[in-house]
Image: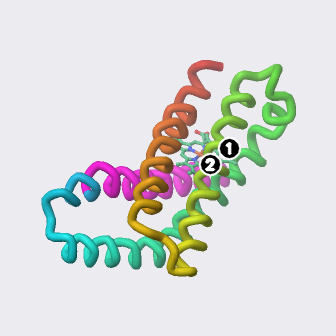
Amino acid sequence: MTYPILLTIHLFAALFFIGVVFFEVLMLEPLRAQMPREAMRQLESAVGARARKIMPWVLLCLYGAGIGMAWMAYGSLLADPLQHRFGLLLWIKIAFTTSVMGHFLTAMALQRRGKLGSRDSRIIHYSVFTHMVGIVMIAKWMFHLS
Ligand code: HEM
């Protein structure tokens, strides 16, 4: 019974996280050219403040449930990834998700020191967006390619 609960938590947290990243890159970024600079700055700052409040909890659920599922069900496949394609793909997914966490922590650290410029923020957003596309594809393909 625990596994389906973890899977549900993981799926909803992933929906939220991926949704926010897609919204920022595909909706907010194109608005930059159409909106007055000050209005855009205020909007980004409000979205950023909300994200800083809620995202740590979303990431805790996402990573906690993901690690829990991997621990419960896929330990032996992860231990021998060269023999099992599923294990290999899950390792690749874990590497991508570790990199996403690195981006998140870097953004938080820069923000705290007041050094997160809008160019850095845009680079981080596009990079996380690219990671997200890879993670979602691997998350689904690992079941069908193995
Ligand atoms: C940025 C972080 C992550 C994202 C966006 C993400 C996203 C996803 C998505 C979309 C699925 C497919 C769920 C479904 O369709 O039912 C999935 C499945 C899975 N993820 Fe993650 N994930 C992340 C982090 C992790 C981590 C850190 C681990 C483990 C260390 C992990 C382990 C798994 C496992 C084992 C499954 C298969 C669950 C199943 O269907 O039985 N994920 N993930």
Residue drawn where x is 64% and y is 58% of the image: 102
| Three-letter amino acid code at the position of disc 1 | Ile
Q: Mark 2–mark 1 contact, CB under 8 Å?
A: yes
The residue beneath circle 2 is 97
Q: Which mark is residue 62?
A: none
Within 10 Å of disc 2 (Cα), the crowding (few <14, some 14-19, many 20+) is some
Q: Nearer the viewer, residue 2 or 143?
A: 143
Answer whether residue 14 is magenta in the image.
yes
Whole-percent x, y for residue 131 in the image: 52, 43
Q: Is residue 136 above or below residue 29?
A: above
From the Cβ of disc 2, is ligand 1 less than 8 Å away? yes
> From the viewer's perspective, is 97 left or right of 21?
right
Judge left or right: residue 74 versus residue 133. Answer: right
Which amino acid, mark 2?
Thr
Q: In percent of the image, x 55 and y 80: which residue is there?
A: 112
Residue 24 at x, y percent in the picture? 34, 57
Q: Is residue 109 magenta?
A: no
The quarter of the rendered structure image containing the C terminus is: top right
Look at the image and give the residue range highlighted in magenta: 1-27
The residue wearing badge 1 is 94
Is the residue marked 1 within 8 Å of ligand 1, measured from its CB?
A: yes
From the viewer's perspective, is residue 101 above or below residue 131? below
Q: Main secondary structure of the magenta part?
A: helix
Q: Residues within 10 Å of mark 1 (few under 14, many from 20)?
A: some
